[in-house]
Image: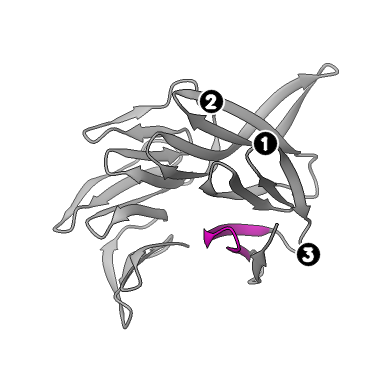
Amino acid sequence: MSVWGSRTDDIWIADYDRGLYRGDGRTWTLAKEARYASDVSGTSARDVWVVGGAVEPPASLWFHWDGAGWSGQHAPFGHGYLRVSAGAPDEVWIGGGPSRWDGTKWAPVVGGPGSVYDLWAPSRGELWALAEHRTQAGGSEHLHAAAVHYAAGSWSTTPLLEFTGGGGRWLYAIWARAADDVWVVGSKVFHFDGMTWSQVCQPDEELTGISGTATRDVWAVGARGSILRLRR
């Protein structure tokens, strides 16, 4: 599941098996049937995006709510768009293989990362993503989970954790309050202060989601149901 809200009385939940639910602070209603919905984001109650998909059977979807009705498509092409983040009404990012909405159409992101696991657009013109990054060393290929930053039209990549197989060590979610306050969670927790990345802790269980409202109000959820408040 994924959750996003524009206000306390306008909360949206993407449920992979059922679709998109909307809460008004008192009750929940099914806003749209959309199987495989995996993420939701927006900029206001009149600008909400939902994406999702599946590998087997192949399916992919994206839908947009403009306050009056839905537009979008649900079509069987490859694995789905798994994550979405809206920095502005005319700048919306989606990944797996990342694409960007410019207000009229989607286009693949040139020069960006390949497989994206999570992304967060804190403002127009800026994106943080958690993606696969492959390197060659010692005659073999190494797979890393990497933090990827887009700003001023250019990309930068910082490998954070190498996948060693077997143990399932990986990173799953990213959230940015500002350029000097970025968090990544998974089997470890990392923080970026605008200059360097540092490991904050290694939790007892893998963390799969993160969000916050301020530097000292950052929350993460775990794969087995734990809720943690993170501090630098």
Residue at horizontal 50%, vertical 26%? 112
Q: Identify the residue position indicated by label 1 in the image.
A: 195
Q: Nearer the viewer, residue 19 or 174?
A: 174
Task: Tell me the distance, in whole angstroms, between the alpha carbons under discs 2 and 3.
Answer: 33 Å
Q: Please name which of the two marks, 1 or 2, marks the residue nearer to the observer.
A: 1
Earlier in the chain: of badge 2 and badge 3, it is: 2
Q: Quadrant of residue 58?
A: top left
Q: Is residue 200 left or right of residue 147?
A: right
Q: Identify the residue position indicated by label 3 in the image.
A: 204
Q: Which residues are magenta?
A: 207-221
Relative vertical location of residue 25 with respect to residue 142 in this rendering, above or below: below
Tag 2's secondary structure?
A: strand
Q: Residues within 10 Å of mark 3 (few under 14, many from 20)?
A: few
Tag 3's secondary structure?
A: loop
Residues tagged 1 and 2 counted as in contact (Cβ below 8 A) = no
Q: Identify the residue position indicated by label 2 in the image.
A: 155
Instruction: Specify the label residue 107 is tagged with.
Output: none
Task: Give the residue type that dot 2 points to.
Answer: Trp
Task: Give the residue type that dot 3 points to.
Answer: Asp
Q: Nearer the viewer, residue 15 or 69?
A: 69
Q: Quadrant of residue 14?
A: bottom left
What kind of secondary structure does the magenta stretch mostly adopt? strand
Viewer can see residue 208: yes
Tag 1's secondary structure?
A: loop
